[in-house]
Each structure stands twice: as C-alpha cells, then as structure tokens.
C-alpha cells in the first residue's frame, strides 16, 4: 500500500505517530505519557464482547509485558490514512506488527494547549506474520 500524502498534515501529528510507534515497539513509558492523554481510552471487540481499556489499565499492561524490541522483532509500521479535521482534531489509520500479529489501529487525536494527544484508540488484529 502506498503511504498517504502528509504534506498538508501538521508536523506535530507526524511526530506523535512516530512516537506512538516507538512506544508500542520499545515500551518507552516516559514517551507513553507524552503520547496518550491521561483521559484516553482504547476500544476493541474480541469474541463479540466490547473490550474497554482506560489509560491507567493500558499503561500497566504495556509496562508489564516484554516489548517487541526486547523479543528481537524489527519495528515495522506505517500510516495507512490520516486526516486533520481541524486545527485541534485529527485521526489516523495505522498498521504495525507485534507479537506475531498485524494490527490496525484507528487513532483519534486532540490538540490541547498546543500539544497533540491520542485521545482514543480502536484496534484490531487483521493478520499474522
């Protein structure tokens, strides 16, 4: 898949996405706190049930697992789609590999006090590698 055109997207969003990929790959918790807003939530539907993970629960899960980097997995990620809705809201569809799975995430961003944050994440395993 060809990478989307990003020249019209705020460079802070592109940096945030790169930091997001690094958080997931390397389990960088100080960076985690700069990427995910403290009021964010993650959503998925697994086995027909809604899975809801508030910030604190997700941070604890990330902190207590081995990272893909520690397991020797290369960082493989890409931005599939991105749209800046306004000066303070945007979304992106991204894909990354971790723990043998190909994941796709829909990330919602909000800009507060001049800083972009992930405020919501929908995620799904779409394949294996």
Image: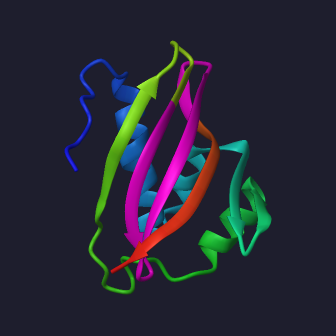
Residue at 62% x, 19% y is 113
- Give the side of residue 54 with respect to residue 22, left or right: right
As for residue 95 lying within the magenta part, the answer is yes
Above/below status of 108 relative to 33: above
Relative depth, front residue between 114 and 53: 53
Q: Quadrant of the C terminus?
A: bottom left
What kind of colouring is applied to the model shown?
Answer: rainbow
Q: Position of residue 93 (x, y in %)?
A: 45, 44
Above/below status of 16 relative to 74: above
Q: Position of residue 42 (x, y in %)?
A: 69, 54
Specify the principal SS of the magenta part: strand
Relative depth, front residue between 115 and 46: 46
Relative depth, front residue between 67 and 3: 3
Q: Position of residue 35 (x, y in %)?
A: 54, 45
As for residue 69 lying within the magenta part, the answer is no
Q: Quadrant of residue 75?
A: bottom left
Q: Residue furthest left?
A: 2
Q: Residue furthest front?
A: 48
Residue at 37% x, 38% y is 81
Q: Which residues are magenta?
A: 91-117
Q: Position of residue 17 (x, y in %)?
A: 41, 44
Q: Residue furthest top?
A: 87
Residue at 67% x, 73% y is 61
């Amino acid at each position: 898949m060809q990478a989307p055109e990003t020249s019209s997207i705020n460079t802070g969003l592109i940096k945030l996405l790169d930091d997001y990929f690094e958080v997931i790959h390397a389990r960088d918790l100080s960076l985690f706190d700069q990427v995910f807003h403290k009021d964010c939530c993650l959503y998925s539907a697994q086995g027909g049930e809604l899975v809801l993970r508030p910030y604190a629960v997700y941070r604890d899960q990330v902190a207590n697992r081995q990272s893909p980097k520690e397991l020797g997995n290369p960082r493989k990620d890409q931005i599939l789609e991105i749209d800046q809705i306004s000066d303070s809201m945007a979304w992106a569809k991204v894909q990354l590999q971790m723990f043998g799975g190909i994941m796709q995430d829909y990330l919602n961003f909000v800009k507060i006090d001049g800083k972009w944050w992930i405020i919501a994440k929908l995620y799904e395993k779409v394949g294996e590698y």
